[in-house]
Amino acid sequence: KAAFINFISDEEWKSIEPVSSWFGPSSLLMSSMSALFKLSMWIRHGHGYLTEHLGIPVWGSYALFGLATLFLGMVLGLVSEALGPDF
């Protein structure tokens, strides 16, 4: 607590460089990182639901997520192929 008060009262905060716009909270990079973290939490909660509430073994949950990943890759591949080589 004392270090924080000294930081403010001695005006040490003036010597700190501002954050680059690339790393600002509203930048595209940080918004993308936030989306990835939200996705990982969704996957974690989904895994917990499958194993705890539905009684699926852990390996079964991993297999379901693996199959979902493969299926999503196939769908995205087909969509990009349907859009043509210009995509």
Image (cartoon, grey):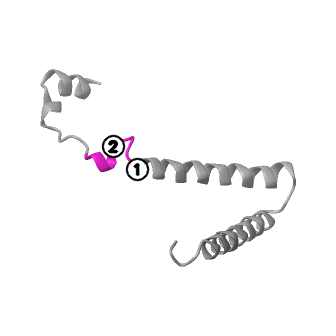
Alpha carbons under labels 2 and 1: distance apart: 9 Å
**50 left or right, relative to 83:** right
> Residue 40: x, y in percent?
60, 54
Helix, strand or loop under label 2: loop
Q: In the rendered structure, does residue 30 fall within the stretch colored magenta?
A: no
Helix, strand or loop under label 1: helix
> Residue 85: x, y in percent?
54, 78
Q: Rate crowding at label 2 as few (under 14), some (14 to 19) or many (20 or more) other CA atoms within 10 Å.
A: few
- CB under 8 Å between callouts 2 and 1? no
According to the picture, the residue beneath numbered tag 1 turns out to be 28
Task: Indicate the amino acid at tag 2.
Answer: Gly
Q: Rate crowding at label 1 as few (under 14), some (14 to 19) or many (20 or more) other CA atoms within 10 Å.
A: few
Q: Quadrant of the N terminus?
A: top left
**30 left or right, relative to 3:** right
Task: Indicate the amino acid at tag 1.
Answer: Leu
**Magenta span:** 20-27
Residue pictured at 67% horizontal, 74% vertical: 78
Residue pictured at 13% horizontal, 32% vertical: 14
Q: 9 or 76, which lies in front? A: 76
> Residue 13: x, y in percent?
17, 31
Q: Quadrant of residue 9?
A: top left
The numbered dot on residue 24 is: 2
Q: Quadrant of residue 83?
A: bottom right
The numbered dot on residue 58 is: none
Residue pictured at 70% horizontal, 48% vertical: 45
Q: 35 or 82, which lies in front? A: 82
**Main secondary structure found in the magenta portion:** loop
